[in-house]
Image (spheres, rainbow, N blue to C red):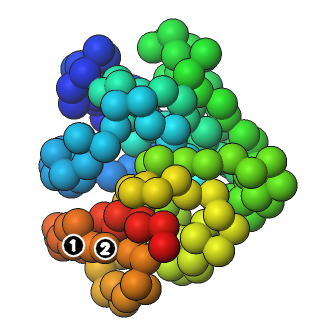
């Protein structure tokens, strides 16, 4: 796993060995970031299933201001921490060793707002659309926030809420992703 571009271009990131995480492959990650690149500069990022931290760290490399990463698995949490330290991004990344549910509660209580959200849960957790709906309901998205939802092909229908615009919907192998833009109405 590597950083594609930006100030940390080509830097290699550690990943957790074994089946406990499923990182987005480089080809898909490149497709996603090519679509969202113009929205990243100065963005406040939320990454609810950190894995290795690769999505957040790619965003930081491309100019995002800060990323909040949630990871409940202790070994994955340590990998994220090591990647953040290796890139010397401790001031720009906050890692929460907690479930996505707990972090959603924390951000709601503290009224945190985000410009870019990565929803990339383990395939067995079919919660991506529920998370997106909760973020909208709780008011934690800035106007024109970008939401990247990555999941096993065919798992979710495209959300058709009037405050969500689909920027891109793509299938690659057994994976699928949708990029939404949130329009605050």
Residue density around tag 1, few if under 14, some if 14–19, many if 20 or more, within 10 Å? some
Compared across the picture, whether 69 is left or right of 62 comes to right
Q: Nearer the viewer, residue 136 or 56?
A: 136
Q: Nearer the viewer, residue 61 or 27?
A: 61
Q: In the image as oriented, which residue stretches furthest toward the right?
A: 109
Compared across the picture, whether 104 is left or right of 163 comes to right
Task: Judge whether 6 appears above or below 41 on screen.
Answer: above
Compared across the picture, whether 75 is left or right of 158 comes to right
- Mark 1 = which residue? 169
Distance (Cα) linking label 1 and label 2: 11 Å
Secondary element at image label 1: strand
Q: Residue at x 52, y 38 (%)?
A: 44
The spot of residue 26 in percent (x, y) is 22, 44
Which mark is on residue 73? none
Q: Residue at x 20, y 67 (%)?
A: 168
Q: Residue at x 52, y 16 (%)?
A: 89
Which mark is on residue 165? 2
Q: Nearer the viewer, residue 31 or 18?
A: 31
Q: Are marks 1 and 2 in contact (CB under 8 Å)?
A: no
Secondary element at image label 2: strand
Question: Which image quadrant is residue 66 in?
Answer: top right
Task: Judge whether 115 appears above or below 140 on screen.
Answer: above
1 vs 2, front mark: 2
The spot of residue 67 in percent (x, y) is 54, 35
The spot of residue 119 in percent (x, y) is 48, 61
The spot of residue 13 in percent (x, y) is 39, 26
Q: Residue at x 61, y 39 (%)?
A: 68
Q: Nearer the viewer, residue 2 or 135?
A: 135
* Residue 80 appears in view: yes
């Amino acid at each position: 796993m590597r950083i594609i571009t930006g100030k940390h271009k080509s830097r290699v990131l550690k990943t957790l060995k074994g089946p406990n995480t499923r990182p987005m492959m480089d080809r898909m990650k490149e497709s996603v970031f090519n679509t969202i690149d113009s929205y990243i500069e100065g963005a406040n990022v939320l990454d609810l299933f950190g894995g290795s931290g690769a999505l957040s760290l790619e965003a930081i490399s491309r100019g995002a201001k800060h990323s909040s990463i949630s990871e409940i698995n202790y070994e994955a949490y340590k990998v994220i921490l090591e990647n953040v330290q290796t890139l010397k991004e401790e001031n720009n990344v906050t890692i929460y060793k907690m479930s996505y549910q707990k972090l959603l509660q924390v951000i709601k209580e503290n009224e945190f707002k985000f410009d870019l959200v990565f929803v990339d849960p383990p395939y067995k957790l079919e919660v991506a659309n529920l998370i997106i709906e909760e973020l909208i309901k709780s008011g934690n998205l800035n106007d024109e926030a970008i939401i990247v939802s990555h999941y096993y092909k065919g798992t979710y229908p495209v959300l058709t809420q009037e405050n969500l615009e689909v920027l891109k919907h793509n299938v690659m192998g057994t994976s699928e992703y949708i990029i939404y833009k949130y329009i605050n109405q």
